[in-house]
Amino acid sequence: MTKFINNVNKYLSEMKIKQAYLSMITGIDKNKMSRLLTGVQEESGTDMEKIARGLGKNIEFFLADTIIIPRACTSAANKIAFYAGEPSGEQQQIANQLMELMENIDEVMSAKCRFENMARG
């Protein structure tokens, strides 16, 4: 595996980010994401850019010899269930609003963790 992928995997593990979520926010197919993260498929420059941007970093962050990963906040696990059938228009709208809310909550919680880590020194 490349240094980039090794560092991405460390970051995902430490920050408790799932491959499926990374696939969703980058637009990279889940199967391809799995091949990239396991080293089966070599990543392109475009893949590296999408992954880094999706994780809020630049490519250079993941190419460094050592990366500093902020300590992830620990909180109770949230469980979300999705309707598995064909959603109605209203259900689709609600699902989209929930996804937007979850993305915003993730940003707020990430910022909170960063501020707490900075306050600790």
Image (cartoon, helix red, strand yellow):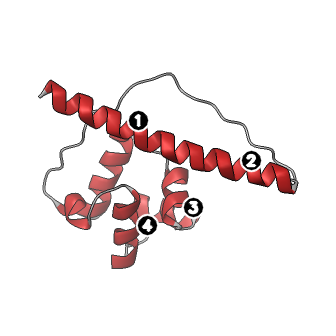
Mark 1 Cα within 10 Å, few/some/many (few <14, many 20+)? some
Q: Mark 3 highlights which residue? A: 30
Q: Amino acid at mark 3?
A: Lys
> Which tag, 2 or 4, sits closer to the chain's start?
4
In the displayed orientation, state which residue is furthest to the top. Answer: 76
Q: Mark 4 highlights which residue? A: 40
Q: Mark 1 highlights which residue? A: 109
> Which tag, 2 or 3, sits closer to the chain's start?
3
Asked which quadrant contains residue 43, the reply is bottom left
The x, y position of residue 40, in whole percent, is 43, 66
Q: In the figure, is residue 58 to the left or right of 38?
A: left
> Which tag, 1 or 4, sits closer to the chain's start?
4
Calculate the distance from the C-alpha at mark 2 to the C-alpha at mark 1.
Answer: 22 Å
Q: Is residue 119 above or below residue 63?
A: above
Q: In the figure, is residue 79 to the left or right of 28?
A: right
Q: Amino acid at mark 2?
A: Ile
Calculate the distance from the C-alpha at mark 2 to the C-alpha at mark 3.
Answer: 24 Å
Q: Please state, as top left, top right, bottom left or bottom right, where the C terminus lies in the image.
A: top left
Which numbered disc, 1 or 3, marks the residue closer to the eye? Answer: 1
In the displayed orientation, state which residue is furthest to the bottom. Answer: 45
Report helix, strand or loop for mark 1: helix
Name the residue located 33 percent from the left edge and 39 percent from the top edge.
Answer: 111
